Image (spheres, rainbow, N blue to C red):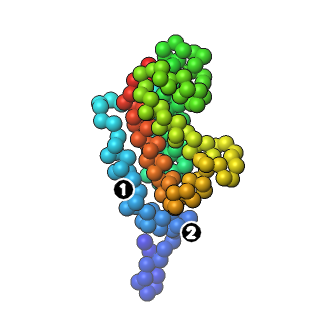
């Protein structure tokens, strides 16, 4: 850092650099906590297989989004990862038609008819319903929309989103542990 004629530090960074630097300092501890949380629950069973390159990149995006408290993106991407995991497994096992199903239709097909525990299918479907208002137009008072859920639970919407994101990460990790077919 340069000094002026009186020995005071002069900040030559532009406003974008200063703002990002200040943001980094202000949020470092929170981001570190989320980073630690992510790896506290990361599956520890040797070489984790994420699937295709796209699946691996989705997984890494979930990590980055969670660390940065981008909770809606975490939910959307974690469900995308789970959906791809199901689709890739179906395709590998010769179920070409079923591998093109939507997540909703895959969950319906697997419910009670696969090695995937029904409790897991129910939890993924519950999260899918919470995700839907972010990716599909819904009525303002739809029971799964964020406003309705925060009003019903008397909770701040940010806390609800954080819990949804943690649930999404948990389900994504669980999808790596369970046998799909």
Residue on which disc 1 sits: 33
The quadrant where residue 103 appears: top right
Q: Which mark is on residue 15?
A: 2
Q: Residue at x 33, y 36 (%)?
A: 43
Quarter of the image for the N terminus: give it. bottom left
Q: Residue at x 50, y 25 (%)?
A: 111
Q: Is residue 32 above or below residue 10?
A: above
Around disc 1, counting alpha carbons within 10 Å, would you say few (fewer than 14), some (14 to 19), or many (20 or more)?
A: few
Query: Which of marks 1 and 2 precedes in the sequence?
Result: 2
Nearest the viewer among 19 and 14 is 19
What's the distance in space between the residues labelled 2 and 1, CA to CA?
A: 28 Å
Q: Residue at x 43, y 47 (%)?
A: 166
Report x, y in % for residue 124: 49, 36
Q: Residue at x 29, y 30 (%)?
A: 46
Report x, y in % for residue 181: 44, 19
The quadrant where residue 170 appears: top left
Q: Is residue 54 above or below residue 41?
A: above
Badge 1 marks a residue whose secondary structure is helix
**Residue at the extreme front:** 152
Q: Nearer the viewer, mark 2 or mark 1?
A: 1
Report x, y in % for residue 104: 58, 31
Nearest the viewer among 158 and 6 is 158
């Amino acid at each position: 850092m340069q000094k002026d004629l009186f020995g005071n530090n002069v900040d030559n960074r532009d406003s974008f650099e200063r703002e990002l630097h200040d943001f980094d300092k202000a949020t470092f501890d929170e981001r570190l906590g989320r980073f630690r949380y992510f790896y506290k629950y990361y599956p520890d069973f040797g070489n984790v297989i994420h699937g295709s390159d796209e699946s691996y990149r989705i997984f890494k995006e979930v990590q980055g989004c969670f660390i940065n408290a981008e909770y809606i993106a975490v939910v959307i991407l974690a469900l995308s990862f789970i959906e791809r995991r199901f689709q890739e497994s179906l395709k590998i096992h010769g179920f070409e038609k079923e591998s093109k199903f939507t997540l909703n239709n895959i969950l319906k097909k697997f419910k009670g008819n696969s090695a995937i525990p029904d409790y897991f299918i129910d939890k993924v479907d519950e999260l899918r319903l919470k995700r839907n208002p972010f990716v599909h137009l819904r009525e303002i008072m739809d029971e799964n929309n964020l406003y309705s859920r925060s009003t019903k639970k008397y909770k701040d919407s940010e806390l609800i989103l954080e819990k949804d994101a943690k649930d999404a990460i948990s389900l994504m990790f669980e999808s790596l542990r369970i046998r799909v077919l």
